[in-house]
Amino acid sequence: MNNENNVVTEDKTKVKVNKMPLSKKNKLILFVGLGIIAIFIIILIISSFKTKNNSLPNGVNENGEMVIDSSYDWANKYGASLYDTFKESDKLEIAFVNVNTTTEPEMIIKYNDEQDRLVWQIYSIDKDDVKKTRKFFNADFYLITPITNKNISWYMYIGSKDYGTYTIMSQLVDGTALDSSIKATNDTEVGKYLKEYLHSNYKLVFYEVEISNFKDDFLKKVDKYTEDNENAQKEIDKLSDQYDEYVLEHGNGEEIPIIKLAAFTLQAGTYEGKLYKSVEGNTTFELVYVQIIDYNTLKYNNKELKFTVEGNDLKCDDDVTINVNGNNKFDITDENGVNVSYELKVEEEKEEEKPLDTN
């Protein structure tokens, strides 16, 4: 009879597992797998290298140099030099203009420096090398000719709205500008300038170039060069015609005050207008006069006023604005809102009285 409290135990036998050597087939599978892994790693390395190269900005080679492939050799040189200088910047603006007789145009750039000041520089090609002038501030550019000779040139203007200096740009480029060509730093010099020079208000066209898209933006501007150059030449021809008309009318360098505005001219002299009034229900008028004395002084309402030229307006003391709407024609609206049109009064030549023939 078995005792229910007896515990029956079984001996556990350890099972020994024999490691079987790899067969030739298994070795082949292992080598193929390792080979696939190695190829995958190589592909990753090549892909990483290509991705690194593809991350370079458009037009930049592996040496970090910008390569511009336009049809103009001067543009290719300008582009490479400009990118090398400004590749850490955000953007700048460029314009091309031919300031001398060379075949390559000059390049003018403007940008904001570290102090957020607006800066201008002129680039040029000299013996296949790119040169640039020093930095300029408060600059603008104009076509100007003296009235003593038809020598139309591009000038850089440095100054404020009212006063400044003009320098022939070709002299800035070749380094022969020892001083400004024309001084207009006070009322007397401004008057002298207006008397001795004819001045075009044509503006150079500047185009923005984003550094992140440098090559495409730069080439777009280069493509615009022919059109811009033709427009500038039209303005030079217009100024040439204006010079011829001036000399024909006034002589070469004659001492006659002529005020140049954006589109018109005013000759010094007396201007007559009609101030209309209603008297007892009837409309009548009285003659009123404005006298332009010289290049910055006129007489209005029996007061001498100083004026400056702004577009086609004369901005005078006492908040008087004269709107010029034709050669030797203008309007003035007084403080009461009454508008009067004026025109240069031409003195009629009186016929010389002849003695009666008593024979």
Image (cartoon, rainbow, N blue to C red):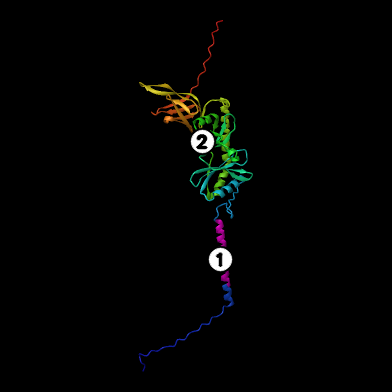
Residue projecting furthest to the front? 178
Q: Residue 122: where, in percent of width, then height?
A: 56, 42
Distance Cα–Cα, label 2 vs label 1: 68 Å
Q: Residue 159: where, in percent of width, then height?
A: 50, 37
Q: Is residue 243 visible?
A: yes
Image quadrant where one finds the N terminus: bottom left
Range drawn in magenta = 31-54
Residue identifier under label 1:
41
In the image, residue 160 sits, relative to residue 333, either above or below, namely below
Q: Residue at image x 57%, y 63%?
A: 43
Q: Residue 268: where, in percent of width, then height?
A: 50, 25
**The magenta stretch spans residue 352:** no
Q: Residues within 10 Å of mark 2 (few under 14, many from 20)?
A: some
* Residue contact between numbered discs 2 and 1, judged by CB atoms under 8 Å: no
- For residue 164, which numbered disc appears in the image? 2
Q: Residues within 10 Å of mark 1 (few under 14, many from 20)?
A: few
Amino acid found under the numbered disc labelled 1: Ile
